[in-house]
Image: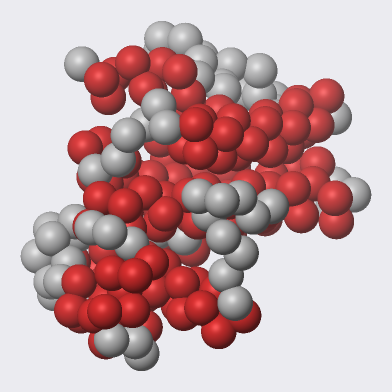
Amino acid sequence: MATAQQPRLRADALRNRERIVSAAREALVEHGAESSLDEIARRAGVGNATLYRHFADRRELIHHVTLSVMARIADRAETARAEEPDAFVALRRFVHAAADERVGALCPLLADGIDKEHPEQVDARDRLERGIEDLMAAARAAGQLREDIAVGDLMVAITQLTRPLPGSDCVDFDQFVHRHLQLFLDGLMAPARSELPGSAVTLEDLRRKCHK
């Protein structure tokens, strides 16, 4: 809802804003936090002045990119849960869809590019966590998902497998991501084939590690 601080955008301005966020996400995945704002504006098909009308600086733009990515991934979780009658198929569908967002490449931005305690970040993170928890709880209740893992375990695998490899010679990397995610998902199925070291990892565990 529009406020005095955040007036409702016209349709053309909203489209420009969405194009900028989308272009920024692509550039940040490819080039990291130092991606050129000029290049982002060019990709979005807008002028630099338009970019700065929407986002005061790089930090604000990164803030909105992370919100967009978390919202998209949460949408994927909720849609998979609603549309797939088989709980583990829903979980599998979500994991592959989340990988397509290339969250591993965006992890460095989450480490030091944003205010993680900003209310919008907290709300987006909570919604995402609820969506994944619901998927995992349904698969667990159906006897399809092993008991000794948590949301953090899932996110570690997705982020690590979607993190770009060192160097620039590895082309068409996505074909390997989905292949190895499938192997990982097979390892999540119940009954468990081995005992995991340590304990199940939550998202709070991951946040505490990142803050050290």
Task: Give the residue at x 33% y 62%.
Answer: 55
Closer to us: 106 or 165: 106
Closer to us: 43 or 137: 43
Residue 42 locus on image (x, y percent):
26, 87
107 left or right of 39 in image:
right
**Is residue 96 among what the camera can see?**
no
Task: Give the residue at x 75% y 42%.
Answer: 88
Q: Is residue 41 above or below residue 185?
A: below
34 left or right of 117 in image:
left
Residue that lies at the very extreme toward the front in this rendered image: 4
66 left or right of 134 in image:
left
The colour scheme used here is: secondary structure
Q: Is residue 77 above or below residue 174?
A: above
**Is residue 87 among what the camera can see?**
yes
Residue that lies at the very extreme toward the top in this rendered image: 198
Residue 20 locus on image (x, y percent):
39, 74
Residue that lies at the very extreme toward the left in this rendered image: 167
Residue that lies at the very extreme toward the right in this rendered image: 85
Task: Give the residue at x 25% y 20%.
Answer: 211
Q: From the image, which quarter does the C terminus lie in? A: top left
Closer to us: 3 or 40: 3
Task: Give the residue at x 83% y 24%.
Answer: 141
Number of on-image labels: 0
Residue 151 locus on image (x, y percent):
55, 28
Closer to us: 60 or 210: 60
Q: Quadrant of residue 156?
A: top left
